[in-house]
Image: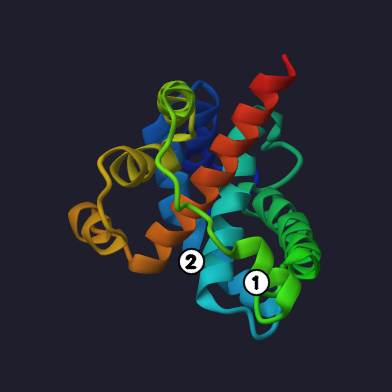
Amino acid sequence: MKETPGSRPIDELAALAAAGDARAFTRLWDTHAESLKTYLRSLIRNLDDFYLDDICSRSFEKAFRQIDSFDSSKSRFFTWLKTIAHNTALDTLEQEIRLRNKYVRIDDAAGAANVEGLGSEAPSPIENIIRDEDDAKKLACIEGLPPLYREVARRRLVDGLKYEEIAEEMGLELNTVRTRIRRARALIAQMKEDGDED
């Protein structure tokens, strides 16, 4: 599908997506995902497939949330999407560096002492109640996910399916499933955190 500023097919899909049409947004994904991955590969050398899929998914998620800010008279959809992807890639790499610096090494005495005995006790009745409340919150959060992540998250976090089973049932690549579940978990954690602040 060729796209130029003001071109009807892409503009119509963007307008439908802005109105909440998940199928239109999925078509935008289908149209642009591979081109966006190619762009990201050229932007960041030696980016493995997992991070490539993750950044691509995050970029589309941001685009989904900001779709009503897209102005077809100012730029092509893909140009707008590339700007989002560029910023997302930088944010993701910065986040990974920060996370690496926080990891606890368990091969030293202090790290081993912190890990020892984890999960050895049965949960108390109060812990069970908290867990049930958390499960209800998790279900509500799953329903609030963008369509790109909702079904994959439901199958993994509610039905307990393995990544391979989800990939087979939904006709997706395994890396795509892993990436979407990772993003879904991050979004759910953010929704819970936002809910706790209210």
Residue drawn at x 53%, y 56% is 118
From the image, tell me which residue sits under label 1: 112
Vertical placement of 148 versus 128: above or below? below
Residue projecting furthest to the top: 198
* Amino acid tagged 2: Glu
Residues 119 and 36: in front is 119
Q: CA distance from mark 1 to mark 2?
A: 43 Å
Q: Secondary structure at mark 2?
A: helix
Residues 189 and 147: in front is 189
Residue drawn at x 65%, y 85% is 46
Residue 100 screen position, x and y as percent: 74, 70
Residue 57 screen position, x and y as percent: 54, 54
Binning the other alpha carbons within 10 Å of mark 2 as few (below 14), some (14 to 19) or many (20 upward) gives: few
Vertical placement of 95 versus 111: above or below? above
Q: Earlier in the sequence, mark 1 or mark 2?
A: 2
Residue 135 screen position, x and y as percent: 41, 28
Residue 54 screen position, x and y as percent: 56, 60
Residue drawn at x 27%, y 58% is 162
* Amino acid tagged 1: Ala
